Image (spheres, grey):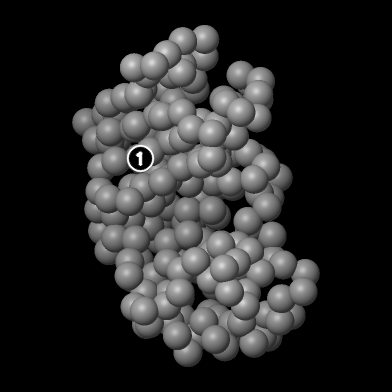
Amino acid sequence: MSWIVHFLNARGAFSQTGAGLRAAVEDARTLLEARSAPKALDVIVKASTHAARYPFSVGGACYEPGCIELTVDFSRNAALDTLREEILRTLCHEYHHAIRWDGPGYGDTLGEALVSEGLAQVFVHEVIPCPPEPWEIMPPDLDLRKTCKRAYDGFDDADYAHDEWFFGSGSLPNWTGYALGKALVARHLQTAPGKTALDLALEPAAVFRETLKVLAKDR
């Protein structure tokens, strides 16, 4: 069981950087498989001018079991070393999603999305030392108590507005769901000594729900 890496390069987007980026993906595979059982994955790497989250050049997605997508935005003219670092961080996050897809899945409800994203982001910091990424920093103007209550009440809601919670399309600040999910999982781990985000990769989201009440009282 291993990774099969596919560079979508029919138009030569990776002609200058392909070897270096392929090496970065291989470094990430070696690092991640040293921490968990090897997992059969297709890793698709494609170029785009509009896919990466600001301010980075690499975006990632894991929408189904066994497949991770990486999108590299060359319009930012990032150096190869920067792209390598971003690939490592992104693959750590998406790899956790891939593990979870082989268990309970990403999920369809608000609570499941919060937990899946939170676990993946905590896992990034378990694997590599890196500063907080923009989407995991709690928005300074967020009413955490109110938001935790809203998340608690809507935890099992399958009709939740994903773009509002995670991409700021409504009343919530951009990336609220990512930051709240990360804070929720980090707080939950404080009550589970010795456990890691990897240990909890297959844990049902419902286990985390009551921690929202605890998190609300922390601020």
Of residues 1 and 49, the one drawn nearer to the viewer in this rendering: 49
How many numbered tags mark residues here? Answer: 1
Q: Quadrant of residue 189?
A: bottom right
Q: Quadrant of the C terminus?
A: bottom right
Q: Quadrant of residue 182?
A: bottom right
Q: Could you tell me which residue is drawn at 52 percent across and 82 percent down?
A: 151
Query: Which element is circle 1 on?
Result: strand
Say whether residue 195 is left or right of residue 81. Answer: left
Question: Where is residue 157 drawn, in percent x and y?
Answer: 38, 82
Question: Where is residue 54 drawn, in percent x and y?
Answer: 64, 45
| Any part of residue 23 in sight | no
| Any part of residue 42 in sight | yes
Of residues 205 and 9, the one drawn nearer to the viewer in this rendering: 9
| Residue position for label 1 | 68
Q: Quadrant of the N terminus?
A: top left
Q: Could you tell me which residue is drawn at 54 percent across and 86 percent down?
A: 150
Q: Could you tell me which residue is drawn at 54 percent across and 40 percent down?
A: 50
Q: Quadrant of residue 204?
A: bottom left
When the figure is inspected, residue 157 is found, relative to residue 183, above or below; the finding is: below
